[in-house]
Image: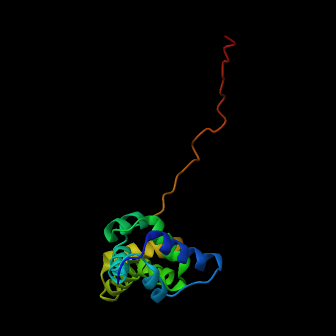
Amino acid sequence: MPRQPRKKVIKKLTHYMNGKVKCTLDTLREISDKSNFDQIVSILKKSFQQDLNVEEACLEAGIRKSTFYCWCNASDEFSNSIAQAKQRLRVTAKKTVAASIEKKDIEITKWWLERRAKDEFATKTETDNKNQNFNQEVTIDIDPN
């Protein structure tokens, strides 16, 4: 697909946004000035699945952050697919912890309980203040110079 002039692409996206019409990934692909749109989306998703932030993911994909946000605003489908990619690492981590607990890994089980059942299992520090005098007098000198 030949590259479209940047002004034409911006005009098309502006048309979508002014009309508050959300477009599909196919529409983004058609009006994008990048002929390798699918490859860019794939790189973005992989980057977010590796917990990279927007700036880092855009750097990996070779696009500007403004382009990324423009695509997010223009397409709910694109935005939702990115949101899902961002959650994937978190879900994988939770599944890994759960699998370790099911394998009876004591250290992981303790770690999980300390964080998820804090009232019962968190490490607690108690202090004994019975022998301390809290009625101490403090004097503050104010120098007028």
Relative to 5, 119 lies left or right: right
Q: Where, by quadrant of the figure, is residue 21 drawn?
A: bottom right
Q: Quadrant of the N terminus?
A: bottom left
Instruction: Residue at 34% x, 81% y: name it.
Output: 42
**134 relative to 29, above or below:** above
Residue 84 visible in image: no
Q: Nearer the viewer, residue 40 or 89?
A: 40
- The answer to which of 40 and 10 lies nearer the viewer is 10
Q: Residue furthest top?
A: 145
Instruction: Indicate left or right for 126 with 100 as reference.
Output: right
Task: Point out the residue furthest to the right here.
Answer: 144
The quadrant in which the C terminus is found is: top right
Q: Residue at x 29, y 88 (%)?
A: 103
Residue 113 vs residue 101: left or right? right
Q: Residue at 58% across / 74% down in the picture?
A: 14
Measured as percent of width and height from the top left, residue 57 is found at: 37, 69
Report the label total. Answer: 0
Residue nearest the viewer, comparing 138 with 7: 7
Percent across and percent down for residue 19 are: 65, 80
* Residue drawn at (31%, 84%) of the image: 100
Task: Give the colouring mode of the picture.
Answer: rainbow
Q: Percent position (x, y) of residue 38?
A: 35, 84
> Is there any visible trace of residue 124 in the rendered image?
yes
Where is residue 94? Give x, y as percent: 39, 81
